[in-house]
Each structure stands twice: as C-alpha cells, then as structure tokens.
Amino acid sequence: MNKDVAGKWVKALRSGEYTQTANNLQYGARHCCLGVLCEIGSKEGLSVRTTDNGDIVGTSLNSQKSIKDWSGMKTKSGGYTEKNGETVYLTDLNDEKEYTFEQIADVIEKEWENL
C-alpha cells in the first residue's frame, strides 16, 4: 500500500477521533478500521459511497473502489501473508479477533508494504 496513506491511517487510528465497530465500514458514529481509511480518503476529496443516512457503504473496500485504488491496497479486506504462510485480513482482526485500533495500527506499521 502507499506509505504516505498508511502513515495517515495509522495516525487516524491512534487519534482517538474514531469509535470502533465491526462488520460495517461505518455504523452511525462508529467505524471499522477500513471505514477510518475511507474517512481519510473522503477528507482528501475522494468519492466515497454512502447510504441515505450518510454511513459509508459496505463491509470491505469492494464497495469503495476509489479508496482501494488511492490507498494502493492489494486486497479489499487488507490482506497480507505472515511468515508461516497464513493470510491475515485487517477486517478479521477488527471484526473477529476484536483488535483495538491501536493494535491494528501496529499491524499496519509493520505490514504496510504487504497490504
């Protein structure tokens, strides 16, 4: 992924500005880690698809092609392969393993080139 975008994303995740949710990019005032990435892109002028109530559409970047392209993410769910060959997805860390935004930021800092 793009290094500058990764840095902005890590900063936003650690900012305390966003409250975390799971299974949606945005649900009301809450965001998943990829929803935060969409918010950053929106603030930079990119088009982000939203529902009638203003929530960001989707559960992955599959619904947000402009954000995926801009960020340079290789997968729609923030996937990377660990040394043991296991593929890990940021969406799974956020939704299933309940990583905090701080923990996800740590992963992004370490794996940004592979995302």
Image: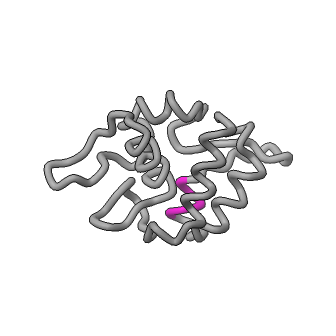
Image location of residue 14, percent across then percent down = 60, 66
Q: How many numbered badges does the structure rendering display?
A: 0
Residue at left offset 85%, top offset 46%:
83
Name the foreground residue: 68 vs 92: 68
Image location of residue 18, percent across then percent down = 45, 67
Horizontal side of residue 58 vs 22, given as left or right: left
Q: Is 36 situated above or below 76?
A: below
- Quarter of the image where the C terminus is located: top right
In magenta segment, residue 53: no
Which span is picked out in magenta?
A: 91-95
Name the foreground residue: 43 vs 90: 43
Residue at left offset 21%, top offset 53%:
54
Q: Main secondary structure of the magenta part?
A: helix
Image location of residue 53, percent across then percent down = 16, 55
Q: Is 3 situated above or below 99?
A: above
Residue at left offset 53%, top offset 65%:
96
Horizontal side of residue 60 vs 85, given as left or right: left
Q: What is the quadrant of residue 103 in the picture?
A: bottom right
- By what rule are the colours in the image chosen? one colour
Image location of residue 94, percent across then percent down = 54, 62
Direction left: furthest residue: 52
Horizontal side of residue 18 vs 14, given as left or right: left
Horizontal side of residue 79 vs 107, given as left or right: left
Name the foreground residue: 83 vs 70: 70
- Quarter of the image where the N terminus is located: top right
Name the foreground residue: 15 vs 32: 15
Q: What is the quadrant of residue 99 in the picture?
A: bottom right
Residue at left offset 41%, top offset 50%:
39
Direction front: furthest residue: 44
